[in-house]
Every structure is written in C-alpha cells, then in structure tokens.
Amino acid sequence: MTKTLYAEFTVKPGREERVAEMMRELTERVRREPGNELFMPYTRESNPRKYFVFEVYRDDDAFQEHITAEYGAKFNAELAGHIEEDGSVLTWLQAVK
C-alpha cells in the first residue's frame, strides 16, 4: 500500500530564493529514489512563501528509505533555519475506496 502525504511550511521573508534552490535540489534526488512515485513541490499562488509538497511512496519501506536518506536529513536541518514553523507539517492521506 502506498504512503501518501503532503508537507507544508512557510518560508521566512528574505529566504525565498535559498529555499527554492534547496527544493529544486531535493526534488531531483527524491525523484531518483527507487520507491518514490511522486514528489511535487508547490508554492501557493496567493503567497509564494507558503509551500505545499505532495509525496507518494511505493510502501512503508520506501518511505523509511526516504526519511533516513542522508541528504534529506541535511535538507531538513538547513530548512529549519529558513521557515517559520519548527519543521514541515505533515498530513497523511488515505485513498478513498
């Protein structure tokens, strides 16, 4: 069963360019993960400092590989200094059947 979620965070004013660069780099790496099915970062049209990242992984194991990747840990450590929240706010989704 796939693991589906979205992550949200708000970039601090003046940090937009760096976070966009970080997201581009992270997106390239995550999309190469064998268990990643979809990784789509967005910003809100009405407020480009607000990010919404939609993610789908093949299964629990694929998600565990994702969250334990060294580059992800480095990304999250740096991101913490650029966003208003303590970290990305995750919302888990379940398909309607």
Image: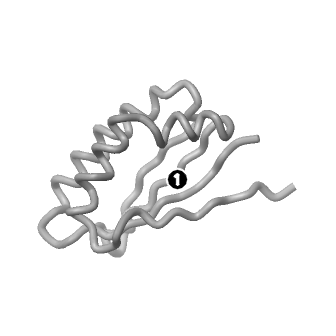
Residue placed furthest toward the right: 97
Place of residue 41 in the rendered image (x, y in percent of width and height, measured from the top left): 42, 51
Q: Where residue 58 appears, x then y in whole percent?
A: 66, 35
Q: Residue at x 28, y 73 (%)?
A: 84
Q: Which residue is mark 1?
A: 54
Name the residue rendered at 16%, 63% in the picture: 15
Could you tell me the amino acid type at mark 1?
Answer: Phe
Q: Tell how many labels.
A: 1
Q: What is the secondary structure assignment of the residue under circle 1? A: strand
Q: Pinpoint residue 7: horizontal percent, then vertical percent.
A: 48, 60
- Viewport quadrant of the C terminus: bottom right
Q: Quadrant of residue 94?
A: bottom right
* Quarter of the rendering occupied by the N terminus: top right
Q: Is residue 9 left or right of 5 when viewed as pictured?
A: left
Q: Quadrant of residue 19?
A: bottom left
Give the crowd class for mark 1: few <14, some 14-19, many >=20 residues within 10 Å.
Answer: some
Q: Nearer the viewer, residue 61 or 96?
A: 61
Give coordinates of residue 47: x percent, y percent: 32, 73
Q: Is residue 74 above or below residue 52?
A: above
